[in-house]
Structure formats: structure tokens, C-alpha cells
Amino acid sequence: MSEHVEVPESHPRYLSLLTRHRIEDGVEKGITSMQGLIAQGRGEAFDYLLGERTIESADAAERAAAAHFLLANHPVISVNGNVAALCPGEAVELAEAVGADLEVNLFNRTDARIQAIAEHLREHGAEDVKGLTADARIPGIDHERAKVDADGIYDADVVLVPLEDGDRAEALAEMGKTELVIDLNPGSRSARTATVPIIDNVMRAIPNITAHARALRGATDAELRDIVESFDRETALDEAERAIRNGSFD
Ligand code: ATP
Ligand code: MG
């Protein structure tokens, strides 16, 4: 139903309204969970305070994430119900641009939702979608939430986890993975445990990582390592917090 609601592009809240419609559609299609609706509301509030833009420090984080992807042996992009509803095509495009696997990974795991998301990603051009085998476990977290694919996230050296839950983000970091987290809340544990915290809306962050990866395609490994090493995670978190706390509505 909400698919057919027309929002004029001139509306000042156009992007915010479009986002809500996508999440609503996601719930109707069995892709997004009810919890996902709450997560969306929380993210939206932070985005409002950030001015619904990619701040400079987030752009630097997105460039560092692109460099990590290009240096990786086995990069994986984790897709949950919100990401699948908001930017499925963009996630598929990033996976292609950096040679990453896509793995469906849900906080509230049900086979029906996993199948629906995998199908949705295939409709948006994905060829191979992982997450259906679930034959490995992330150590240190409870059974259902620990499930991953042995040849996917379990094996990855670099993993992009947008809107990840704090416990799982910590457990993945403990496995020694390079963790790229997209989360609008700089105070979230997920952002705080990331190798690269990207404090931005996933709808802006993912295409911008792809753009950086394309621009860096000709770079040498030494140049990529330089980008990775000059990125400072504390600065990224502090700058985002400053933008949120000290911004103005003018
Ligand atoms: P914790 O401190 O345990 O990490 P949390 O803040 O992550 O808690 P949740 O509501 O479980 O709480 O997680 C949802 C997170 O996803 C929030 O931090 C929210 O800001 C973020 N989020 C929601 N929508 C988006 C979006 N479109 N882009 C980026 N981040 C988003
Ligand atoms: Mg979190």
C-alpha cells in the first residue's frame, strides 16, 4: 500500500518520508522486523541532528572503509532487514565494486525473513547470497544470534556491518576482524567497537563507499595502507558527537 504513496520531491522532508515508506514496505514484504521500525526511528533522530548530510569526518571514514575493502582477502557485507529495505541495489553495487560477498545476517533470525531478503537482493541483481547455510557460530554470543556462514562472515577478514547490534559487533571484533560499522549513533557500542566507525545514514554511506572504491581502483597497496593508517577512529566519533551536540537548526 505504502508503495503507492506519492511524496513530491520538493517536500522538505522528502528523503525522510521516502525512507519511512521503504521501511514500511519492508515490513509488509516480510523483510524488515518490527524491531527494525524502532531502530529506524532512533536513527532518524540522529540524522535530523546531523543535518541529514554526510559530515566531512564520515566521508573520511567512508574512504578508509573503501581502502580496507580493496586491501581485504575476503570482504563480506552483512545485510539485515533495514539495509535490505533501504538500499538493496546499492549494497549489491558495493559488493560488485569491491569483490565482497553479501551475507544476510539477522538479529531476529527467522528462515522466512532470511529467504525473503535473499530473494529481494537477487531481484536487485545479487548473484550469490550467503547466510542461508548458517554452519558456523560467532564465539561468545547466544545460539540464534551467533549463526553465520562458515565461508562467509566466519571466514571474512573485513566485514561491513551496518546497524549492527552492540554484542555482536564486540564479538566480531574479538574474532580479530576488521570491522566497518555504519551507525548514526556515535554513542552506540557498535560504533565504539568498530575499526572504522561510519557515522552516517546507510543510504548515503554505502553509495559513497562505492564511489571512493571506484576512485581508488588504480591505487597501489601502499597508497591504500596509507589511507587506512591515517584514519583516526576517535576523531571520527568525536567529530560526529560534536556535530550532533553543537549543531543548529538554522
Ligand atoms: P547499542 O548501544 O547496544 O549498540 P543501539 O543504539 O545500537 O544500542 P538499536 O536500536 O538496537 O540500539 O540499534 C539501531 C541503531 O541503528 C541505532 O544506533 C540507530 O542510530 C542506527 N540506525 C537506524 N537507522 C539507520 C540508518 N538508516 N543508517 C544508519 N544507522 C541507522
Ligand atoms: Mg548499536
Image: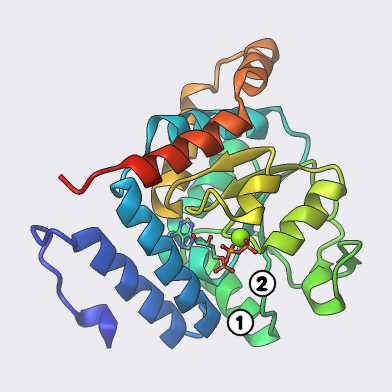
Give residue 12's quadrant in the image.
bottom left
Q: Quadrant of the C terminus?
A: top left
Residue under the image location 47 percent in, 76 percent down = 38
Which kind of residue does numbered mark 2 sit on? Leu
Query: Quick check: can you spot residue 245?
Result: yes
x and y percent of residue 13 in the render?
18, 62
Q: Residue at x 57, y 73 (%)?
A: 117
Q: Residues within 10 Å of mark 1 (few under 14, many from 20)?
A: many
Q: Position of residue 52 (x, y in %)?
A: 30, 49
- Relative placement, left or right, of 15 versus 184 is left
Label 2 vs label 1, nearer the camera: 2
| Residue matched to label 1 | 113
What residue is pinned by disc 2?
106
Amino acid at the residue labelled 1: Arg
Pointer 2: residues within 10 angstroms few (<14), some, or many (20+)? many
Q: Secondary structure at mark 1?
A: helix
Queried on whether the Cβ of the residue with tag 1 lies below 8 angstroms from ligand 1, the answer reads: no
Whether residue 133 can be seen here: no
The N terminus lies in quadrant: bottom left
**Disc 2 Cβ-to-ligand 1 distance below 8 Å:** no
Q: Earlier in the sequence, mark 2 or mark 1?
A: 2
In the rendered image, the vertical position of residue 154 relative to residue 96, given as above or below: below
